Image: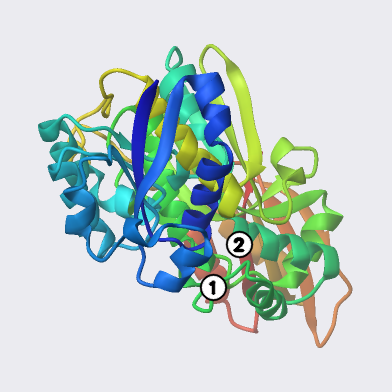
Amino acid sequence: MKKIGVAILGLGVVGGGTYKILTEHRDFYKKNHGIDIAVEGVLERNKERALSLGIEESKIASNIAEICSNSEIDIVVEVIGGIEPAKTFVLAALNSGKSVVTSNKELYCKYSHELEKVAKRNGCGLYFEASCVGGVPVIRALLDNLQGNKITSLTGIINGTTNYILTKMSDGGDSYEEVLKEAQKLGYAEADPTSDVEGFDAAYKLSILSSLSFHTKVPYTEIYREGITGVDATDIRCGKMLGYVLKLLAIGKCGENGIEVRVHPAFIKASHPLASVSDSYNAVFIKGDSVDDVMLYGRGAGALPTGSAIVGDIIYCATHQGNNYSTFKNTEKADPATKFIRNFESEYYLRLFVEDRAGVLSKITSIFSKHGISVAQVNQEEAGNGLVPLIIITHTTLENSVKKAVNDINALSGGSKVLSVIRVVS
């Protein structure tokens, strides 16, 4: 029976979950996959934590060199997170001839070109299923199951923290600040939630997924990014009245005019499959030219779901000959021939306060007309303090046109003001 030695770098939530799965399922993998996977080393600063998991003291390394020089180790699992020291450790492992499995979306997004180059040079595997959408096998689907398709679009809820916050705001009507504090207490949000709530985490994942889907490098710097910190509970309430649900969406499209990649809050119809994805769950909705629509759904984070993806990569690495690398030229920047669409098309929801007097509404509609924006729906609430709350839904129009219209409306005298602009995804 083939024996596979594994080292785990970091025994936090995900590292601990991975160790638990590997040890508890060891006999299962022997029986069903014909491989004996043994954890032969760990790198963890908190020695007591490693011992509490049942790891032998002799297998607790004090530095990365001990891991790299251990001939019993074939695959190194990196679950430290962040850039350093994770990058240094992964490069050391690859240079020592060991394959690497990582859950580190920021590292892989920003430095996959460098990591893959070293992996190729040393004949090592580089696996990253756990970097995107936790336990949902979206990367394996793109690499091994949907490769017969030209992927034309993917739309996903790929950050559990923001999905939890928006779900709670929708269910209870609480403010963003109130729900964020609750999410932090429950461990759904970090003490510094910036990466999640400002959309960086989703942008890293979208960079990886869209590069795989469209077979060209899509750097995260090319992604339009907008977080949820400005979301108002009033807009969630108004959206529900109109039949919409608010989600932080990661959207990638590939067409004749180029690639469009964006992360931002968006309204989707309550009947859309993604609308029912609540709390910390994630889902990715993929459209292929042959398969049409596919949706992958599951837990986007957590010790065991993410550990499941890591162990899946370990088994895949152990049971497949040779190594697969990017289907595109994996460089730091995008291929010069790749065109990115920044002035994208969408429908829009706008919430305004306008003066309650004759002629004001006609001025606003003329501004929309000036910028080529067609209005699909107008809803007016009761007036207050001389200002009328107004909700406008547009037909499909250009992003830049909406921005210009908003600037013109805000420049009107008399107090008319655009309070919110949210894209609507059909």
* In the displayed structure image, the side of residue 325 where residue 3 appears, left or right: right
- Determine whether 71 is above or below 3 in the image: below
Which residue is found at the position 50% from the left and 31% from the top?
Answer: 153
* Res. 301 visible in picture: no
Q: State the residue lying farthest toward the right.
A: 382
Q: Which mark is residue 161?
A: 2
Quadrant of the rendering where the N terminus is positioned: top left
Q: Position of residue 200 (x, y in %)?
A: 43, 61
Q: Position of residue 419 (x, y in %)?
A: 64, 73
- Element type at marker 2? helix
Residue on which disc 1 sits: 190
| Whether label 2 touches label 1, CB < 8 Å | yes
Name the spot of residue 51 as percent of width and height, x first: 46, 65
Please tell me in which quadrant of the rendered image residue 291 appears: top right
Towards the viewer: 163 or 25: 25
Compared to residue 350, the image places residue 101 above or below, namely: above
For numbered disc 1, what is the local secondary structure?
loop
